[in-house]
């Protein structure tokens, strides 16, 4: 919690902190280890000064003690987490975006997987990532670290009910396409719609039956039979970049 009473969280690593500053994220302060003196760190300090963000210098041991759960690598930033998009704000974001598309995560519980999905979503140009508010990973410091700046680029939208959120998107002209290993429809043979919401399941059970029922189409990623499935973040990356490939081919 910041001095102004705002909800905050810590992110670690020069890359993630730099991305937060570049994206206009509200950064309360930055803590640096005194032995950090490389070019990227100097550039970060300059960017922080330009943004009016205070930079504190600490012994590395003091950072370890103050931030035991953050893989800070000698650099950490306290950021305001209130930037997470509210569910009620999603429709306006989509209306302001040319050919928007969305990634929906169905009970992905590992923050590292969430972070990896956000990183892929940012790289692919996804408009927003939605996930259930309960029984799913939130946008923690660990997730932000793995996202490597992606969490500061793609809006993350916690929703009360994922199925209802998908139905609202469908009513707005989106097609819901779920990733399901049992589907006989290959992602590579499917003409993916422009306004698409990709739906990916969690680590334990994959796409839940209830969520799958709200999808217009289920597709699978072809793979060798010796493996039953891919990690959710890997499968998501393949789906997002297949969409990007098809969009480029149609342009």
Image: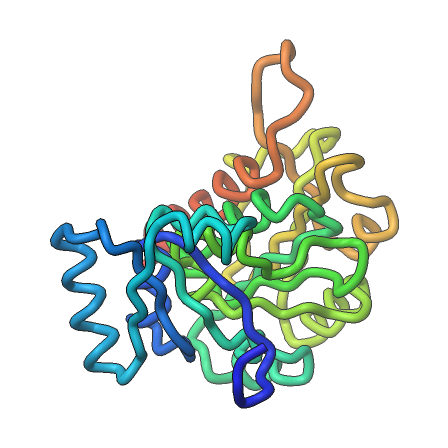
Q: Residue at x 16, y 72 (%)?
A: 46
Where residue 69 sits: x, y (%)? Answer: 56, 49
Please identify the residue farthest to the right as the structure is shown: 210
Q: Is 79 or 202 nearer to us in this picture?
A: 79
Where residue 73 sits: x, y (%)? Answer: 36, 46
Residue 90, by quadrant, is bottom right
Q: Is 228 or 40 nearer to us in this picture?
A: 40
Please identify the residue farthest to the top as the structure is shown: 226
Residue 132, by quadrant, is bottom right
Q: Residue at x 66, y 51 (%)?
A: 199
**Does 62 sit left or right of 218 as displayed?**
left
Above or below, comparing residue 8 to residue 236 in the picture: below
Q: Is 189 or 75 nearer to us in this picture?
A: 75
Number of labels in the image equals 0
Please identify the residue farthest to the bottom as the structure is shown: 4
Coloring applied to the structure: rainbow
Above or below, comparing residue 200 to residue 93 in the picture: above
Q: Residue at x 66, y 41 (%)?
A: 179
Above or below, comparing residue 31 to residue 88 in the picture: above
Where residue 196 sits: x, y (%)? Answer: 57, 60
Screen quadrant of the N terminus: bottom right
Residue 63, by quadrant, is bottom left
**Does 151 sit left or right of 60 as displayed?**
right
**Residue 46 appears in the figure:** yes
**Residue 250 appears in the figure:** no
Q: Residue at x 86, y 45 (%)?
A: 209
Q: Is 155 or 21 nearer to us in this picture?
A: 21
Where residue 109 sits: x, y (%)? Answer: 71, 47
Screen quadrant of the C terminus: bottom left
């Amino acid at each position: 919690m910041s001095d102004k009473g705002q909800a905050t969280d810590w992110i670690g690593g020069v890359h993630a902190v730099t991305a937060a500053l570049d994206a206009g994220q509200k950064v309360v302060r930055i803590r640096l280890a005194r032995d950090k003196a490389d070019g990227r760190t100097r550039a970060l300090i300059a960017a922080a000064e330009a943004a009016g963000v205070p930079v504190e210098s600490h012994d590395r041991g003091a950072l370890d003690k103050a931030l035991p759960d953050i893989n800070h690598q000698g650099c950490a930033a306290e950021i305001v987490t209130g930037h997470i998009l509210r569910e009620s704000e999603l429709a306006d974001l989509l209306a302001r975006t040319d050919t928007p598309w969305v990634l929906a995560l169905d009970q992905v519980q590992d923050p590292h997987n969430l972070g990896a999905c956000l990183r892929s979503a940012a790289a692919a140009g996804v408009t927003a990532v939605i996930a259930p508010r309960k029984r799913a990973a939130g946008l923690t410091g660990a997730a932000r670290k793995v996202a490597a700046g992606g969490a500061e680029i793609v809006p993350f939208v916690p929703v009360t009910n994922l199925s209802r959120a998908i139905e609202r998107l469908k009513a707005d002209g989106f097609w819901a396409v779920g990733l399901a290993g049992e589907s006989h429809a290959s992602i590579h043979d499917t003409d993916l719609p422009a306004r698409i919401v990709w739906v990916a399941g969690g680590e334990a059970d994959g796409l839940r039956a209830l969520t799958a029922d709200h999808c217009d189409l289920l597709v699978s990623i072809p793979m060798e039979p010796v493996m039953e499935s891919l990690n959710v973040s890997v499968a998501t990356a393949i789906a997002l970049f297949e969409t990007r490939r098809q969009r480029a081919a149609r342009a």
